[in-house]
Image: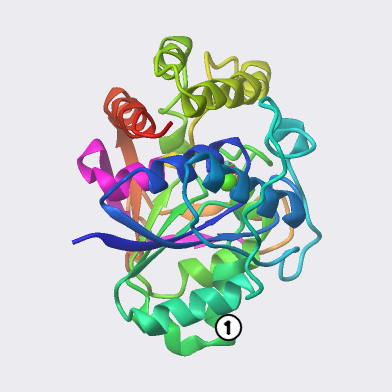
Amino acid sequence: MTRKIILDCDPGHDDAIAILLALSSHELEVLGITTVYGNVGLEYTSRNARIMVELAGKTTKVFAGASRPLLRERISAENVHGKSGLEGPVFDEPKLPLEAQHAVQFIIDSIFEHPNEVTLVPVGAFTNIALAMRLEPKIIPLIGEIVVMGGSTTLGNTSPAAEFNILCDPHAASIVFSSGVKLTMFGLNLTHQCLATPDRVAKFKALNSRVGNVTVQLLEFFKLAYNKRYGFAGPALHDPCTIAYLIKPELFTVQNMHVEVDVLPGPSFGRTVCDVWDVTGKPANCDVAMTADADGFFDLLIERLGTLE
Ligand code: RIB
Ligand code: CA
């Protein structure tokens, strides 16, 4: 049976590859793609999501959501993704229209239409998910599960303590982590194990397809920030890890633990406080991804993107 998902994203280079993986995988039924501010502003993330749907040769509906966080000021990551959020390849403007319905209402309606069957996959700020939970609390027990890219059991990437998606909107993240919904977290401790190194990029190039070539161009731009800051041989493919997990969970190991988000002002604002050693005795609320079969992950990614033109 296919799994129904809503991918909530802020494309962004890695979001873009996550969209391609989701739309090329028969195990998943993408009910819709919802967009949120994050790497770049909402107008760009909504444009970029439609560009990637068209590149995949699909007509999946795209719904725009929140343009700013619940409480804090908006931050962004043009320094990593460029002004448009998809620097590298040259794209025509998308023809696929943006849906008139707000993303938050689409999320609510989808969950009521498919109770206990929808997996929410937020890979940007969690603002849309939090707003849906606050606007219509009745959906909370009807959400199948939530698989997020965000947080870290170790260091942050946007502050020493906080990962970007969480720091974008710690209050929204706290609502999601404390919701009681079945939750799986792919944090930087995991995603930094999945680097698009030159030998792996060469396999995308060898696809010799428009999708393969665009992916190479995206990765060539995306790697600049990772080479400069971390000295990594390639960029971390954060967001596609969530999709790969839904398709082939055996590529990853997870550990059940208590996770909470620090929402207090200060150097740890936005940190995912992960009780890896169960020192608090607080009830576990999250499966945290701890190890990845990186070669297996990229084999899956290349195989699935190879089915697109
Ligand atoms: O910290 C990495 C995350 O922030 C990824 O989802 C990336 O796309 C950005 O949204
Ligand atoms: Ca993202």
Return the residue nearer the eye: 49 or 10.
49
Left or right position of 183 against 68: left
Q: Position of residue 73 (x, y in %)?
A: 81, 60
Q: Position of residue 152 (x, y in %)?
A: 49, 44
- Identify the residue shown where x is 60% and y is 68%: 128
| Quadrant including the N terminus | bottom left
Q: Position of residue 185 (x, y in %)?
A: 41, 52
| Quadrant including the C terminus | top left
Above-or-below relation of 206 to 81: above
Return the residue nearer the eye: 95 or 100.
95
Residue 181, by quadrant, is bottom left
Magenta range is 241-262
Left or right position of 132 against 27: right
* Colouring method of the image: rainbow
Above-or-below relation of 52 to 125: above
Residue 109 visible within the image? yes
Task: Give the quadrant of ligand 1.
Answer: top right
Q: Which residue is mark 1?
A: 134
- How many numbered discs, if any? 1
Above-or-below relation of 7 to 102: above
Kindly tell me whether mark 1's CB lies below 8 Å from ligand 1.
no
CA neighbours of label 1 inside 10 A, class few (<14), some (14 to 19), many (20+): some
Q: Position of residue 178 (x, y in %)?
A: 47, 72
- Identify the residue shown where x is 59% and y is 14%: 231
Task: Say whether residue 118 is magenta.
Answer: no
Task: Say whether residue 250 is magenta.
Answer: yes
- Identify the residue shown where x is 56% and y is 63%: 173
Residue 154 visible within the image? no
Q: Amino acid at mark 1?
A: Arg
Left or right position of 73 against 148: right
Q: Secondary structure at mark 1?
A: helix
